[in-house]
Image: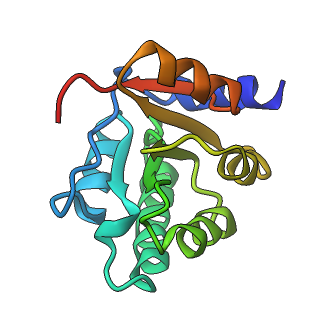
């Protein structure tokens, strides 16, 4: 399937199979870029880009820096991820998701609710969805709703 080949391509760029945690407030474009250049998935919560219109400039800044890196280095940068809080309390979700789709964010990490429509939107351009889970029941729900992989949350 296309998601399997997309996943394989993304994994081939990793030096280590790690995702830099999308840390509330702390994660920003500079940290994400450094993580990706080091060979791990760099990530940030969409909600860190405030106000909302900053999300697009953050994504563009990351994409431009990684493209510059890739043009001058044999070893390509790892992909980056945007963490989306899918809980109904996130009134930015639709706008933030539209920005991620527009700019074809390679990896979207979903948290606090698995939604088929969010997964379908990311899959529409070949993106990968990883879903945060705290137990096997939520893991099964996430996979049933179309997540490509799981992030096992142990604490935090």
Residue 137 place in picture, x, y as percent: 49, 17
Quadrant of the image containing the N terminus: top right
Could you say which quadrant of the image residue 40 lies in?
A: top left
In the figure, residue 36 lies in which quadrant? top left
Task: Identify whether 86 is placed above or below 97.
Answer: above
Location of residue 25 in the rendering, given as x and y in whole percent from the top left corner: 18, 64
Asked if residue 7 is positioned above or below residue 31 in the image, the reply reads: above
x then y, percent, for residue 96: 53, 70
Q: Determine the residue located farthest toward the top in the rendered image.
A: 136
- Tell me: 110 left or right of 135: right
The front one of 110 and 69 is: 110
Can you say whether 98 is above or below 87 in the image? Answer: below
Q: What x and y, as percent, mark residue 110?
A: 49, 45
Name the quarter where the C terminus is drawn.
top left
Location of residue 151 (image quadrant): top left
Q: In the figure, is residue 109 to the left or right of 103? A: left
Query: Colour scheme in the image?
Result: rainbow
Asked whether 136 or 49 is in front, the reply is: 136
Q: Residue at 47% of width from left, 74% of height from top?
A: 91
Count of marks placed on residues: 0
């Amino acid at each position: 399937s296309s998601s399997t080949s997309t996943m394989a391509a993304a994994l081939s760029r990793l030096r280590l199979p790690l995702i830099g945690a999308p840390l509330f407030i702390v994660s920003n474009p500079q940290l994400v870029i450094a993580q990706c250049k080091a060979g791990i998935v760099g990530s940030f919560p969409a909600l860190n880009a405030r106000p909302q219109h900053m999300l697009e400039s953050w994504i563009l800044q990351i994409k431009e820096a990684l493209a510059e890196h890739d043009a001058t280095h044999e070893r390509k940068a790892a992909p980056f991820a945007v963490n989306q809080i899918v809980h109904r309390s996130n009134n930015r979700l639709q706008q933030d998701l539209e920005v991620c789709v527009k700019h074809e964010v390679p990896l979207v990490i979903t948290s606090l609710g698995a939604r088929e429509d969010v997964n379908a939107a990311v899959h529409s351009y070949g993106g990968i969805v990883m879903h945060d889970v705290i137990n096997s029941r939520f893991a099964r729900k996430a996979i049933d709703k179309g997540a490509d992989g799981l992030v096992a949350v142990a604490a935090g």
